[in-house]
Amino acid sequence: MDYMREALKEAYEGINAHHGGPFGSVIVKDGRIIGRGHNSVLLKKDPTCHGEMEAIRDACKNEGTHDLTGCELYTTAEPCPMCLGAILWANISKVYYGCNVSDTDKIGFRDDKFYDFFNGKKSILSLEESNRKECQKLFEDYNNDKEAKRY
């Protein structure tokens, strides 16, 4: 099976239904697709509903786990920083992408804004520490809870 073609089908489904941008993804484990998703930002009015995020949510639901170790992700465009974070948290080990960041920029998506922020070139967000001691207590309580699930 050509998994990138399946990601393309997802993307076309989304754009034809006006759900969001041209981003589709599938997640594969042991030669079978376990998760699918396309950009649903406009449909769900949620900026986190990128194709990769939707595929991760679908795969986790289908597999009954938050850990996608051993999976590969196929996506129509190089993942943005948010999606890369989710891919890392999900323990996905390999990503195949079609278009790159400059291709994405050419159609009006602004990933460069985030890369500039992460590289310290531009301040688009203010980060400030607050109530650290209370939050450290929360972490300590969590860490001492032997029943707590990690992650």
Image: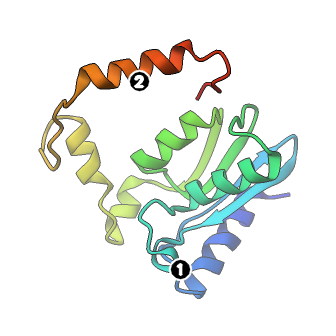
Viewer-nearest of labels 1 and 2?
2
Helix, strand or loop at label 1? It is loop
Q: At 65% from the left edge and 27% from the top edge, which residue is drawn?
A: 149
In the picture of the structure, the residue carrying the numbered disc 2 is 138
Pinpoint residue 84: horizontal percent, then vertical percent. 48, 42
Residue 37 lies, with reference to residue 64, above or below; the image says below
Residue type at tag 1: His
Q: At 21% from the left edge and 44% from the top edge, which residue is drawn?
A: 116
Apparent side of residue 22 relative to residue 34 in the rendered image (left or right): left
Pinpoint residue 59: horizontal percent, then vertical percent. 74, 51
Crowding around mark 2 (Cα neighbors within 10 Å: few <14, some 14 to 19, many 20+) is: few
In the picture of the structure, the residue carrying the numbered disc 1 is 19
Q: Quadrant of residue 23?
A: bottom right
> Mark 1 vs mark 2: which is more N-terminal?
1
Helix, strand or loop at label 2? It is helix
Pinpoint residue 60: horizontal percent, then vertical percent. 72, 47
Nearer-the-camera pick, 79 or 1: 79
Q: At 29% from the left edge and 61% from the top edge, which residue is drawn?
A: 110
